[in-house]
Image (spheres, rainbow, N blue to C red):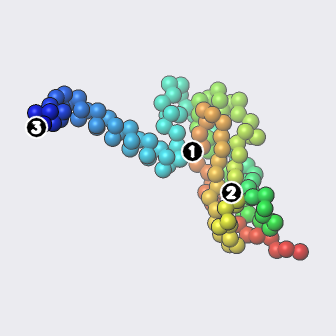
């Protein structure tokens, strides 16, 4: 049994160590990309990337169908900085970018701040959104 375990660990030791290090590097790269909400694939593109800022995009409020209350948000627009290849940014229309505040969860309370989410077409990623959060207030019932 001991020669089997010794052979399992020591045979091709450097190859196994290299594979372990490479797996760790891939794990940490994906983990950081998820935490920062960026796409690591966009940065691997061979064509040069450019940035484009689109100002005063309207913020859409997303609520569940059961929600009877209305909500107001402040501010009502956001500035979004996008990144992608030059051809994709040239052909981009404002309507293809969605700036959303999700209030469908039951935790949408009065006076709360909610994070703005940005949806972009494939090949284009958002770099920054300003402001990052909006103030949400339920409108009073009449």
Whether residue 43 is visible to the viewer of this picture, yes or no, is: yes
Q: Residue furthest left?
A: 3
Which residue is rendered at x = 81% and y = 66% of the image? 68
Badge 3 density bin: few <14, some 14–19, many ≥20, Cα 10 Å: few
Q: Quadrant of residue 113?
A: bottom right
On residue 127, the disc is 1
Q: Position of residue 121 (x, y in %)?
A: 66, 36
Give the residue at mark 2: 102
Q: Nearer the viewer, mark 1 or mark 2?
A: 2
**Residue nearest the observer in this picture, 83 or 13:** 13
The residue drawn where x is 16% and y is 29% is 11
Q: CA distance from mark 3 to mark 1?
A: 54 Å
Q: Residue at x 71, y 29 (%)?
A: 91
Viewer-nearest residue: 66 or 85? 66
**Which mark is on residue 2?**
3
Q: Residue furthest right?
A: 142
Q: Secondary structure at mark 2?
A: strand
Classed neighbour count for the residue bearing mark 2: other residues with Cα under 10 Å, few (<14), some (14–19), many (≥20): some
Q: Secondary structure at mark 3?
A: helix
């Amino acid at each position: 049994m001991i020669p089997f375990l010794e052979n399992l660990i020591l045979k091709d030791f450097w190859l196994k160590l290299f594979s372990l290090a490479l797996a760790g590097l891939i794990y940490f790269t994906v983990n950081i990309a998820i935490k920062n909400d960026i796409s690591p694939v966009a940065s691997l593109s061979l064509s040069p990337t450019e940035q484009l800022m689109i100002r005063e995009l309207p913020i859409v409020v997303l609520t569940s169908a059961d929600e009877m209350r209305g909500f107001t948000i402040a501010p009502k627009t956001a500035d979004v900085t996008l990144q992608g290849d030059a051809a994709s940014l040239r052909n981009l229309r404002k309507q293809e970018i969605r700036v959303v505040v999700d209030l469908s969860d039951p935790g949408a309370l009065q006076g709360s701040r909610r994070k703005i989410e940005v949806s972009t077409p494939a090949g284009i990623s958002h770099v920054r959104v300003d402001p990052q959060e909006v103030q949400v207030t339920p409108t009073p019932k009449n």
